[in-house]
Image (cartoon, rainbow, N blue to C red):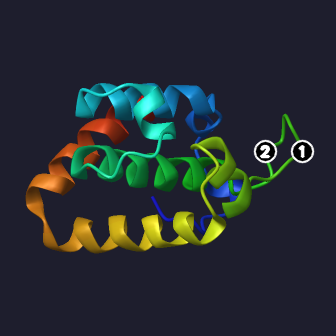
Amino acid sequence: MNPKMSYWLMPMYRQKEPELILNEVASAYNITVGDIRGRSRRRAVSEARQIAAYFLYDMFNVKMAHTKSKWGTKKVGEYIGGKDHVTVLYSIKVVNGLLETDPWFKERFELIKSKIYK
């Protein structure tokens, strides 16, 4: 899904709780939500953190009808453990790049996406 998609074009399933995203990503990588919010630089943890940032930004960077609020990169960064907004932007860039070049990553990404957006 395109992070710049208009709210009115988005399906209703997009109004999920942010904790669901962290739980699904952590489960897919066999780590804890605490790991995602932590400071670890292990590849699995940092990759999971990048995917979580991508999905959080994708879902909540629009004005939600029921909350009338918008999550920018700063709020997403705070939610995933006090990361800088630039880290979130970088995460989105990395995820988009890996989706184009790494079939294994894309398969895992699609699996997580199907669980989040069901």
Counting from the top left corner in percent of width and height, residue 61 is at 69, 57
Q: Quadrant of the C terminus?
A: top left
User: Toward the viewer: 59 or 83?
Assistant: 83
Q: Is residue 25 above or below residue 61?
A: above
Left/right placement of residue 115 relative to residue 80 reads left
Residue pictured at 47% horizontal, 28% vertical: 34
Residue pictured at 63% horizontal, 28% vertical: 17
Left/right placement of residue 92 relative to residue 58 reads left
Residue pictured at 64% horizontal, 49% vertical: 82
User: Toward the viewer: 105 or 65?
Assistant: 105
User: Toward the viewer: 88 or 59?
Assistant: 88
Q: Is residue 103 above or below residue 107?
A: below
Mark 1 residue crowding within 10 angstroms, few (<14) / some (14–19) / many (20+): few
The residue tagged with tag 1: helix, strand or loop?
loop
Residue pictured at 89% horizontal, 45% vertical: 68
Counting from the top left corner in percent of width and height, residue 104 is at 10, 53
Counting from the top left corner in percent of width and height, residue 64 is at 78, 45
Residue position marked by numbered label 2 in the rendering: 64
Alpha carbon separation for disc pair 1 and 2: 5 Å
Label ID, residue 55: none
Label ID, residue 68: 1
Total numbered labels placed on residues in the image: 2
Report if the CB atoms under discs 1 and 2 are less than 8 Å apart: yes
**Amino acid type, label 1:** Lys
The residue tagged with tag 2: helix, strand or loop?
loop
Res. 72 in view: no
In the rendered image, which quarter is residue 113 located in? top left
